[in-house]
Image (spheres, helix red, strand yellow):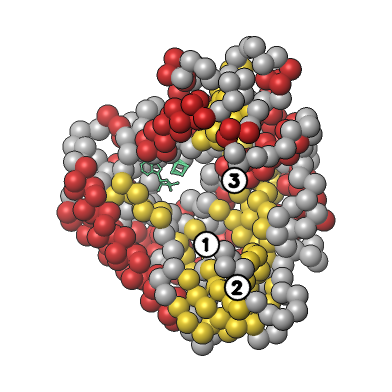
């Protein structure tokens, strides 16, 4: 979502006559679009600000937008007195106000809802893979997570707006649409006539657009994988056979303390239904290790579930206590060295599973999307339906945007292949 917000912020400032630079010393305005999900991300923002204030032009404006702005609030100005603006994730659209009056301090961390989606300009040219945000915020209140505080309660955008943005993205160059939301499969919009729209309706609408060739969505909450959505994997070939459905932990006790009220049978039941709908579907997960009170046995259960589901591509994190969350004040916080040890063990396991999956792809032919040329300029980088990177020698003529690629080799990180049509 931050990548997408970054594009829109850049487009918004373009409309005010500014253009993008990657050189801090050259910039007239420096914006850090921030994530607060773990303490490390927040710390990085403040250390980057320390470096930037020394490198920037004396009159350049500097500020933070996004979740750290909301997390820190007005304290951000105390920590870094020369900040010019602090805008929360739902106030990006107010950024140009600082251009009108560079001598004020712009501060807004309110959760105003969906206003920003309408006020920010649409992209004139869309990337091949374009994100379409359809809902923001989260009602789940997992005890470790700062998102319900920084992004607020769940709100779904209107069905008509989502379809319009999808059509616009397709018209301006998108071939793959990724529907976005913190709890994307909780998408639910009721129109004036009481008609309810779900994510499955949006997938169907996107699939009708000829130039849209691939559809995916992220991130999903396990128990919100409703049957209508699972059915989409059977019915809609444009929906990629890949799903990020974080389990976080394999221990029922830990899940309870995380306030994630599903049990493993239920989770595995959903995986089974997904496989029945689309036998080639693969799943990825997020994991948190070292949650307060996590025992060796709890951790062992996490390893076990990873082996059972065979997640092909996962993100794993050490639990990081966050302000405004109840887990931060739980007893039995786990020492850092144990968290690190568990993370290394889990990562090794997940890497092995990923390598085995990548190797199982050798000899198969997969429909892939071209993402561009690699650093050497001699290879093309394609994305498989499972989001694996596949490196291919540049063909003599134009590179096809979407083509079948025979996978010839694999390692943990990527695949190699040759274009077959
Ligand atoms: N500590 C560590 N990881 C966290 N995540 C969310 N909150 C925390 C936290 N306090 C992870 C979860 C989530 C992903 C986006 O970030 O795994 O799925
Ligand atoms: Fe955070 Fe995801 Fe839980 Fe929502 S479902 S509170 S975004 S971890």
361 vs 154: above or below? below
Q: Is residue 359 left or right of residue 343?
A: right
Find out whether the residues at labels 1 and 3 contact each other: C-beta distance under 8 Å: no
Q: Nearer the viewer, mark 2 or mark 1?
A: 2
Q: Which residue is mark 1?
A: 243
* Label located before the other in sequence (2 or 1): 1
Q: Tell me the element at label 1.
A: strand
Q: Position of residue 2 (x, y in %)?
A: 57, 42
Q: Earlier in the sequence, mark 3 or mark 2?
A: 3
Q: How many marks?
A: 3
The label on residue 3 is 3
Task: Estimate the x, y position of residue 393 in percent, counting from the top left.
Answer: 61, 78
| Residue at image point 50% right, 75% down | 415
Is residue 42 left or right of 10 when viewed as pictured?
Answer: left
Residue 250 in picture, x, y percent from top left:
30, 57
What residue do we see at 65% from left, 69% from top?
A: 369
**Residue closer to the observer: 122 or 208:** 122
35 is higher (above) or lower (below) than 288: above
Real-space CA distance between mark 1 and mark 3, rounded to the nearest whole angstrom = 19 Å
Which dot marks residue 334? none
Q: Nearer the viewer, mark 3 or mark 2?
A: 2
Kindly identify the residue that appears in the image at 54 percent across and 66 percent down.
387
């Amino acid at each position: 979502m931050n990548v997408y917000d970054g594009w829109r912020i850049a487009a918004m400032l373009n409309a005010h006559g500014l253009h993008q630079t990657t050189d801090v010393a050259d910039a007239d305005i420096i914006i850090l679009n921030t994530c607060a999900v773990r303490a490390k991300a927040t710390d990085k923002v403040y250390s980057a600000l320390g470096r930037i204030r020394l490198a920037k032009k004396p009159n350049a404006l500097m500020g933070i937008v996004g979740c750290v702005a909301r997390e820190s609030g007005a304290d951000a100005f105390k920590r870094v007195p020369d900040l010019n603006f602090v805008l929360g994730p739902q106030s990006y659209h107010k950024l140009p106000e600082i251009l009108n009056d560079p001598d004020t301090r712009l501060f807004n961390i309110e959760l105003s809802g969906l206003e920003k989606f309408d006020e920010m300009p649409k992209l004139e040219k869309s990337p091949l893979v374009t994100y379409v945000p359809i809902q923001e915020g989260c009602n789940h209140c997992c005890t470790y997570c700062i998102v319900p505080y920084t992004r607020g309660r769940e709100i779904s955008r209107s069905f008509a707006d989502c379809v319009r943005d999808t059509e616009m993205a397709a018209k301006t160059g998108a071939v793959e649409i990724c529907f976005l939301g913190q709890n994307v499969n909780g998408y639910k919009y009721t129109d004036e006539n009481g008609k309810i729209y779900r994510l499955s309706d949006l997938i169907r609408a996107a699939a009708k657009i000829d130039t849209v060739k691939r559809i995916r969505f992220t991130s999903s909450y396990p128990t919100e994988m409703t049957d209508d959505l699972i059915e989409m994997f059977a019915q809609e070939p444009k929906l990629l056979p890949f799903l990020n459905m974080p389990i976080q932990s394999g221990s029922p006790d830990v899940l309870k303390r995380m306030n994630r009220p599903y049990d493993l049978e239920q989770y595995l039941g959903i995986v089974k239904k997904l496989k029945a709908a689309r036998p080639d579907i693969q799943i990825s997960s997020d994991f948190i290790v070292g949650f307060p009170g996590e025992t060796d046995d709890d951790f062992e259960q996490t390893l076990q579930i990873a082996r059972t589901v065979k997640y092909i591509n996962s993100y794993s994190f050490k639990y990081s206590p966050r302000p405004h969350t109840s887990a931060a004040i739980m007893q039995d916080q786990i020492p850092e060295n144990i968290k690190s040890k568990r993370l290394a063990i889990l990562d090794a396991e997940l890497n092995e599973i990923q390598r085995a999956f990548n190797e199982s792809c050798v000899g198969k032919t997969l429909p892939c999307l071209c993402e561009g040329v690699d650093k050497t300029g001699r290879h093309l980088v394609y994305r498989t339906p499972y989001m694996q990177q596949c490196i291919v020698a540049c063909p003599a003529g134009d590179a096809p945007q979407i083509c079948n690629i025979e996978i010839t080799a694999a390692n943990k990180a990527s695949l190699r292949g040759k274009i077959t049509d």
